[in-house]
Image (cartoon, helix red, strand yellow):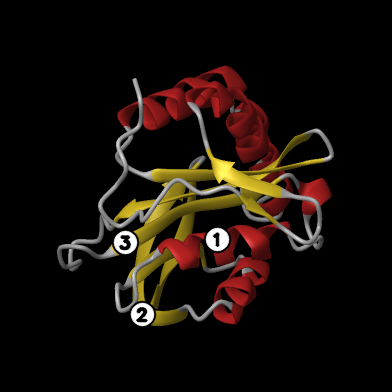
Amino acid sequence: MADPVPPWHSEQMIVQTDSDVEIRPAAVTDAGRIAQVHLTSWKGAYASVLPAEYLDSLDATERAAQWQQILDEGTRTTLVAEGDGRLLGFASYGPSRDEDAEDGDLELYAIYLDPESWGRGVARDLMRTVLADVPDGVPMSLWVLSENERARHFYRRHGFQADGVERMDDIGDTPVTEVRYRRG
C-alpha cells in the first residue's frame, strides 16, 4: 500500500546532508532496521534509567512488526537517515495525541539514533528535516523522560521549551516522569 501524503507534509523529500547522510521517507521494508535502531538506542540512552532486565527483554521481532504496522497505516511521517551503508537513525511525527491539542497540532513521536552515530550531527540533520516540513505557525510537541538531560538539551537547541506539563508513566515496572516540550 502506498503511503498517503499527510496534510502537513509538503512533498516526499530526500535530503543529502553535508556529512554524506541521506534522509528519506521510510518504506515498509525499513521496519526491521528501524526497530533495531530503536532498541539499540533505548539500551544506550536509558541504561541508567530503566532496569537492564527490561531493556534486555525488548524483542526486535515484535518491534519490527509494530513499525511495519505504523508504516503500513501511513498516518504519520517517518524519516530515516542512512549513511555508511546502514540505517543510522529515524524520526517519526504526525498529529498530536495530547488531550489539549488543537486540530492541526503536530507531535514528534520519536527520534532515535544508533548510539554509534551520536555526536555526528545525524540527529541535528534529522531534526532540521522534520522542522522544515512543519508549516510556519504550526505547534509541535514531544515528550521526553525528565532524566534524559542529553535529549532535553538537544530539544532546547532546536527551539522546543518545556511547557510545564508532565505525566507519570510506568516503563518496565519503573515509574518515570515525562516532560512535554513545545515549539511554535
Q: Which residue occupies 56% across, 77% down?
A: 158
Q: Amino acid at mark 1?
A: Thr
Q: Amino acid at mark 2?
A: Gly
Pick whichever, 153 or 51, lies toward us: 153
Q: Position of residue 30 (x, y in %)?
A: 57, 27
> Where 161 sits versus 33, above or below?
below
* Front label number (1 vs 2): 1
Q: Amino acid at mark 3?
A: Leu
Pick whichever, 107 or 174, lies toward us: 107
Report the residue marked by disc 3.
106
Q: Which residue occupies 63% across, 55% down?
A: 49
Q: Position of residue 125 (x, y in %)?
A: 65, 62
Q: How many marks?
A: 3
> Where 101 sits versus 70, above or below?
below
Q: Which residue occupies 21% across, 63% down?
A: 104
Q: Secondary structure at mark 3?
A: strand
Q: Earlier in the sequence, mark 1 or mark 3?
A: 3
Residue 184, numbered circle: 2
Q: Secondary structure at mark 1?
A: helix
Q: Which residue occupies 56% across, 73% down?
A: 155
For the residues bearing labels 3 and 2, Cβ distance under 8 angstroms: no
Q: Secondary structure at mark 2?
A: loop
